[in-house]
Image (tube, helix red, strand yellow):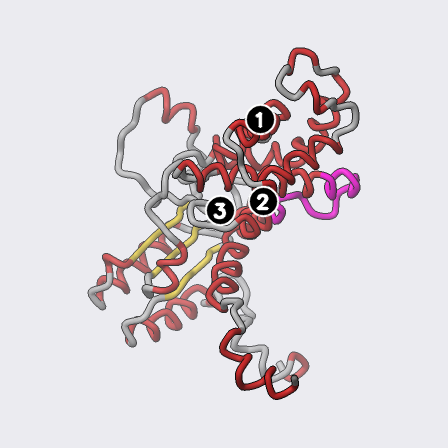
């Protein structure tokens, strides 16, 4: 262990299968429970007995009401069979809307983190990121203005070229501020072959702008399809059961169960990146940005 340095052992547990890594984490979890605090546990190779053990520990300390679970495991069950049978058993996961209270920057960064990594076509992906930022800003402004809840499903509905054009026309009709309309207008103007004067008549559009936009929106299609269909029972269209910001600030006991066998490596990675990105953005928001308190003491002394 000396070659890794003294600071490494607290962050990495080296052991073979059955070596006690999970049991070690359970032991660490007892410490915050003793202090009546909470923690977040993300299991990238989830087993259902992990959630059960954490609940037992929370029960021992009278904290079972603080336990929250985002469970992406389905045990290999077909969602089509569940829907067809009309099964109404007790939900195995809390619902979660990662974009409910998020800012435009957070939503754009979260969606960007879901893109496939190290793939060919980097130019298309960079243009897709620009398209995504325009989509997120316009959709978020509309949600705030109309008092609606932003969700993955809503972003998917507006991601089509017709959806973004409709959002732009709504901004013109409702007299949105220029700062809110500009991202949508700039993107539509940059789509090759798109005539902005025909924005209200999709039937008059040529095939080229649709094709160009499809290349960009296609970068997100796999992820959106997986999240809204395979995990549609978890990603809520309303505010959802879990607010990660509340989970952090109120010392909740939050578990995220990500299966390694039920999903592909890309989907597993995207789920993990989405959650970690949200936590990072929440902590960044907590740091604040106002420097007013520093002006009298530091800056004025230099003026």
**Mark 3 crowdedness (10 Å alpha carbons): few <14, some 14-19, many ≥20:** many
Which residue is denoted by mark 1 in the rendering?
169
Give the left or right position of residue 204, taking residue 45 as reference: right
SS for callout 1: helix
Q: Nearer the viewer, mark 3 or mark 2?
A: 2
Q: Are marks 1 and 3 in contact (CB under 8 Å)?
A: no
Q: Nearer the viewer, residue 218 or 159?
A: 159
Name the spot of residue 145 as percent of width and height, x first: 44, 39
User: Residue at horizontal 58%, vertical 81%?
Assistant: 7
Using the numbered discs, state the Cα–Cα distance from disc 1 to disc 2 in whole angstroms.
Answer: 24 Å
Q: Which residues are magenta?
A: 111-127
How much space separates mark 3 and mark 2, taking CA atoms?
21 Å
Q: Which mark is residue 259?
A: 3
**Which disc number belongs to residue 75?**
none
Residue shown at 55%/32% (left/top)?
Answer: 171
Residue that numbered label 2 is attached to: 111
Residue at point 59%, 84% (across, down)? 300
Residue 203 drawn in magenta: no
């Amino acid at each position: 262990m000396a070659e890794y340095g003294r600071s490494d052992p607290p962050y990495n547990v080296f052991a073979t299968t059955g070596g006690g890594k999970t049991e070690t984490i359970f032991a660490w979890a007892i410490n915050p429970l003793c202090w009546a605090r909470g923690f977040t546990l993300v299991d990238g190779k989830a087993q259902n007995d992990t959630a059960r053990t954490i609940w037992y520990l929370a029960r021992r300390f009278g904290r079972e009401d603080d336990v929250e679970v985002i469970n992406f495991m389905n045990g290999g069950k077909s969602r089509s069979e569940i829907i067809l049978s009309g099964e109404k058993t007790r939900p195995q996961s809390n619902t979660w809307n990662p974009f409910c209270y998020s800012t435009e920057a957070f939503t754009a960064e979260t969606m960007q983190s879901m893109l496939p990594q190290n793939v060919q076509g980097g130019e298309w992906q960079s243009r897709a990121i620009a398209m995504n930022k325009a989509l997120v800003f316009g959709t978020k402004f509309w949600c705030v203005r109309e008092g609606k809840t932003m969700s993955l499903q809503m972003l998917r509905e507006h991601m089509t070229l017709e959806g973004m054009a409709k959002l732009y026309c709504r901004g013109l009709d409702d007299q949105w501020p220029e700062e809110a309309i500009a991202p949508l207008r700039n993107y539509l103007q940059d789509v090759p072959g798109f005539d902005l004067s025909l924005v209200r008549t999709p039937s008059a559009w040529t095939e080229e702008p649709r094709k160009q936009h499809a290349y960009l929106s296609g970068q997100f299609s796999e992820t959106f399809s997986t999240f809204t269909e395979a995990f549609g029972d978890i990603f809520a269209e309303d505010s959802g059961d879990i607010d990660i910001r509340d989970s952090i600030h109120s010392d909740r006991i939050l578990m995220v169960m990500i299966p390694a066998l039920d999903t592909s490596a890309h989907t597993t990675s995207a789920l993990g990146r989405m959650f970690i990105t949200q936590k990072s953005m929440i902590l960044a928001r907590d740091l604040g940005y106002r420097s007013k308190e520093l002006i009298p003491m530091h800056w004025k002394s230099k003026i």
